[in-house]
Structure formats: structure tokens, C-alpha cells
Amino acid sequence: MSFKQKLNVLLTERDLSLLKSLYENVVMTFGQIGDLHFPSTAKSTIINRLTKLEHAGVIRRIRIPKMELGNDKRAIGVVFQITKIGIQRLQQRS
């Protein structure tokens, strides 16, 4: 798959809910996405779905300097954001 080629992914209700959360919150961490949209789901499953959504061009990951937020001691080095394509797909389904 070339860099410019996007995968066509069928968005589920959970995907649309995730896109809406990203739109409303601007960025979210992996932990926030997992807690809100993938409760009781294996980390590898979450990573696989986020990667598919990223390759489809509806979300993007942004690397940030590693940091800790409050009492949550999970180091954060990546946040996720909805893309223009993701916003368009969300509007189409609303």
C-alpha cells in the first residue's frame, strides 16, 4: 500500500462514537479511548482498530513528548485526532 493510498473501512457505531469524541475533545490519549470506547477489550484489539482507522485516513496519531497526567501514571507519548476525512465521514452518517 502506497503512502497516499487510503484503505476503505466500514465504520461501525463504535467508530462513529470514537470520531465524535475526538471531534468534541480535539485530541485523546490511547488510555482515554480505550476506557471510553473499548472497555474490557484487549490492548492489541484496540491497537489494531486504531491502526485501521488511521490507515483509512479518518484519524491520525500525533507524537508528543512523553508525559504523565495527574494520578494516571501511564506515560503518554501519542495522542489521536480526527482528520478532515473523519469529520466528513462523521457528517455523512449524522
Image (cartoon, rainbow, N blue to C red):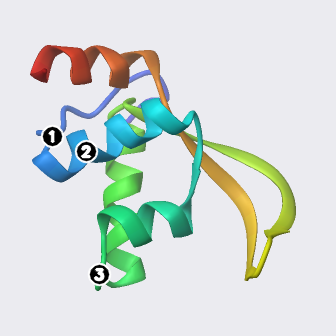
> Residues under labels 1 and 2: Cα distance?
10 Å
Which of the 4 image quadrants contains residue 55?
A: top left
- Please tell me the numbered disc located at residue 77: none
The quadrant of the picture occupied by the N terminus is top left
Residue 53 horizontal/vertical position (percent): 34, 44
For numbered disc 2, what is the local secondary structure?
helix
Q: Residue at x 51, y 63 (%)?
A: 32
- Residue behind mark 2: 17
- Residue behind mark 3: 41
The residue carrying pointer 2 sits among few (fewer than 14), some (14 to 19) or many (20 or more) residues within 10 Å by Cα, namely: some
In the current view of this chain or complex, which residue is farthest to the front? Answer: 71
> Residues under labels 2 and 3: Cα distance?
16 Å
Q: Residue at x 32, y 49 (%)?
A: 52
For numbered disc 1, what is the local secondary structure?
loop
- Residue behind mark 1: 11
Give the answer, above or below, for where 73 lies relative to 56.
Answer: below
Q: Amino acid at mark 1?
A: Leu
